[in-house]
Image (cartoon, coloured by chain):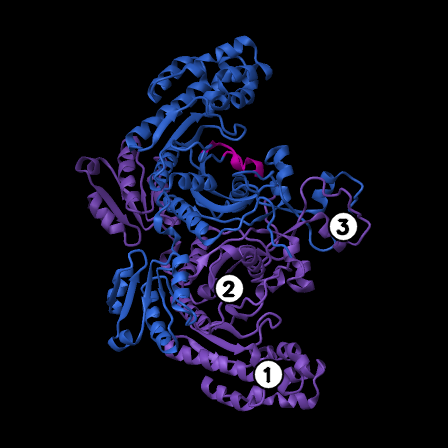
Chain colours: A purple, B blue
Amino acid sequence: MKCSIPKGTRDFMPTEMARRNYIFDTIRNVFKTYGFEPIETPSIENLSTLMGKYGEEGDKLLFKVLNSGDFMKDVDFSQEYHKVAPKICERGLRYDLTVPFARFVVQHRDQITFPFRRFQIQPVWRADRPQKGRYREFYQCDADMIGSESLLNELELVQMVDEVFHRFGINVCLKINNRKVLAGIADLIGAPDKLVDITVAIDKLDKIGLENVQKELAERGLTPEQIQALNPVFELNGTASEKIAQLQTLFANNETGLKGTEELATLFSYIEAAGIRCQVELDLTLARGLNYYTGAIFEVKALDVAMGSISGGGRYDNLTGIFGMPNVSGVGISFGADRIYDVLTELEKFPSDLDQSAKVLFINFGPAEQAYCIRYAAQLRAAGISTLIYPDSAKMKKQMDFANKKLIPYVIIVGENEIASNSLTIKNMATGEQQTLDINQVVSLLK
Amino acid sequence: MKCSIPKGTRDFMPTEMARRNYIFDTIRNVFKTYGFEPIETPSIENLSTLMGKYGEEGDKLLFKVLNSGDFMKDVDFSQEYHKVAPKICERGLRYDLTVPFARFVVQHRDQITFPFRRFQIQPVWRADRPQKGRYREFYQCDADMIGSESLLNELELVQMVDEVFHRFGINVCLKINNRKVLAGIADLIGAPDKLVDITVAIDKLDKIGLENVQKELAERGLTPEQIQALNPVFELNGTASEKIAQLQTLFANNETGLKGTEELATLFSYIEAAGIRCQVELDLTLARGLNYYTGAIFEVKALDVAMGSISGGGRYDNLTGIFGMPNVSGVGISFGADRIYDVLTELEKFPSDLDQSAKVLFINFGPAEQAYCIRYAAQLRAAGISTLIYPDSAKMKKQMDFANKKLIPYVIIVGENEIASNSLTIKNMATGEQQTLDINQVVSLLK
């Protein structure tokens, strides 16, 4: 029988787990210092909660769970498969953390004290075609603050991004834009109905260059005059405050654009006062999921590695509206754990002691020595030190090989002399150095 | 639109999350001090991996995932539903952590150094009828050591059970038995083929009493003589060593029974030497999933609360055999997080500070004060203190209500005086006491 797992899914070995947990723990700890609280939602949601929330493509990518029992009863199988699916599957796997969070807020609105900050670190599932770096099961790490329109929330997201990547030792650039500014631009050039087309096209500026963006804008129905009127957007330059000054002139007669510019001005003044270590840039070509965001939008890129965005988010004004609870404003951020993993690997920034399985191994020479080891192992464990006793009195070489393969940094050797003198001989596996110590000295050494 | 989640699933609010994480972290930390390493397997496995591993009933309770795309193509829907299901579902949700672990070991055998200790804390899914305390999605916390037959492993499981429940402050009784002893008994009474019937029946002794167990044994085809021959099992008494002595006499001519008795004798001698705090009992009426275990079996019950078993496990000699890798012996333990949650709730043993969302809230009086607060909040957060700034300059009462509802133990109040003297006024919400301090004093107070 061949053992395998479904395409696009992964097993995680202890070394990968240690690295992944380092990422999750770092992000979680930063979330907590900003007063975010953990929640969890079920892996399985009613399909009615999920369908229609991610566009037509998203509906196709939802994993559907077959009804239990006689799922075929009263179902007409002469219809097309996408009509049959919802009849035989009432539930599906979580596709992201945002829609379940919106459902959670509406369902538990009476138990929640607003403004509410929650974080959620859980897997999601998408029936996407698997490829390098794209999986069918992967974790999302989301933090959202809802029930407050204050731009202090945006500042704190920026501070969290700064803190998380500072802890990781990854140099990043945080790009900021505002959806209202983009809407103002669409107004200005006389194409308010083309907002999505404009942003989809200019979002590609990095990848395809200005000329191709302009070509795409033409294909999307913008006139040459409208395309030319966009030039000020691409030509904006200088510091954030200089760009903001130029936008204020540009939007002199445009309310939406001016509002967005003011929000940017306030946020950047906060950022300057707070003292952010990472690079922060006002980037008018940043677009991100526009159907969804209504104010600030963020995106984070690593500076020293070629990699897509490793974090992103923004302000939305109507997340819970889809579940019948309108006018709840929120702002959130999501960290891409898999990409952060790849960046840390490429930059060799993982802490070096993550790979340890146990801190120390007691070599097992036989029943008498084993009894002595059990007693002292208990003391090391009580001190919080990860401790192994080799379970059998196998050959010394086999036991030492085991310690080496498992990257255990110390072994303890107990023979007649140690038992007689109530001591332990401890060997540093890296240096080969051996010392005979009492238990308290061993605890101090290994702590 | 009505918001709901599927029957048998749960949302977890921050308070529940804090309590659940306290349970998982405690168990995880004990696992780690014994040198267990974390792994994770995908939520979705190939159905071929899962089917036939949990009995006929288990196959029915597997959640099956509908194939993506045109799942109906070339499928004959005139068959019965349980024949159609595997045609339209290639994958299913993890049903337990044991079978995926066996698959993992076989699949990655070349990368694993044996003996291998792994722990795994992940959700599993079962399409069981939901009822009080039984969910369709729940976490299992498993630790297994494989590739070693040493009884030292059994001892270490006992030590872990002792340590975990000691940390929880739950008084428990750990019951131990051995499958070979049960097999020996079946041999002795001349019914080796009735081993499963015998154990299923005597497993119910606690619930239904001796008379009913004997009735059930008769229904299961044992003769009155055989049933009477079982009496020594029910009549065993005294300490573990006394019971072991009686078993040695009983099994004088039975190899399997004697082997099991010797294993028990060794394990109990280890346990005595190691100094276990919890109550440990040799219980011949303990049976547990017999098709599966081959040596020691364990079960843990809380002493001060009426509740089923809260932990259990045992030795198995052929876990990976189902995937074509025979003769790998292992021993494992599983902690029942949901039941432990209920026990801790009933005994009021959860640490009292788990419910805090943030440690401190800065009251927001307006732009000037807010800027001052941002600076000091950053310093508290840098010291690892969970800190909130109220995002708007709402009415004082509203902000204080927020602190009370969120159980935030301290608020910091900043006005003109504090700004002028570069200080912070901090209020203890429980006592009402207020102090004006500098930032270092505040850090010391909140650390």
- Mark 3, residue position: B72
| A221 and B102: which is toward the camera | A221
Query: Does the magenta segment cover residue B314?
Result: yes
* Residue type beneath disc 3: Met
- Badge 3: residue crowd in 10 Å (few <14, some 14–19, many ≥20): many
Q: Is B126 situated left or right of B441 in this image?
A: right
Considering only vertical position in the picture, is A306 above or below B96?
below
Chain under label 2?
A: A
Please say if the residues under marks 1 and 2 sit with CB atoms less than 8 Å apart: no
- Mark 1, residue position: A184
* Residue type beneath disc 1: Gly
| B16 and A255: which is toward the camera | A255
Q: Residue at x 80, y 47 (%)?
A: A76
Residue A200 on image: x %, y %: 63, 76
Considering only vertical position in the picture, is B342 above or below A80?
above
Q: Is B250 situated left or right of A370 in this image?
A: right
- Mark 2, residue position: A336
User: Which of pointers 1 and 2 lies earlier in the amino acid sequence?
Assistant: 1
Question: Is any part of residue B238 visible from this angle?
Answer: yes
Considering only vertical position in the picture, is B123 above or below A237?
above
* Residue type beneath disc 2: Gly
The residue positioned farthest toward the right in the image shown: A78
Chain under label 3?
A: B
Magenta-highlighted residues: B313-327
| A118 and B100: which is toward the camera | A118
Residue B108 on image: x %, y %: 51, 47
The quarter in which the N terminus of chain A is drawn is: top right
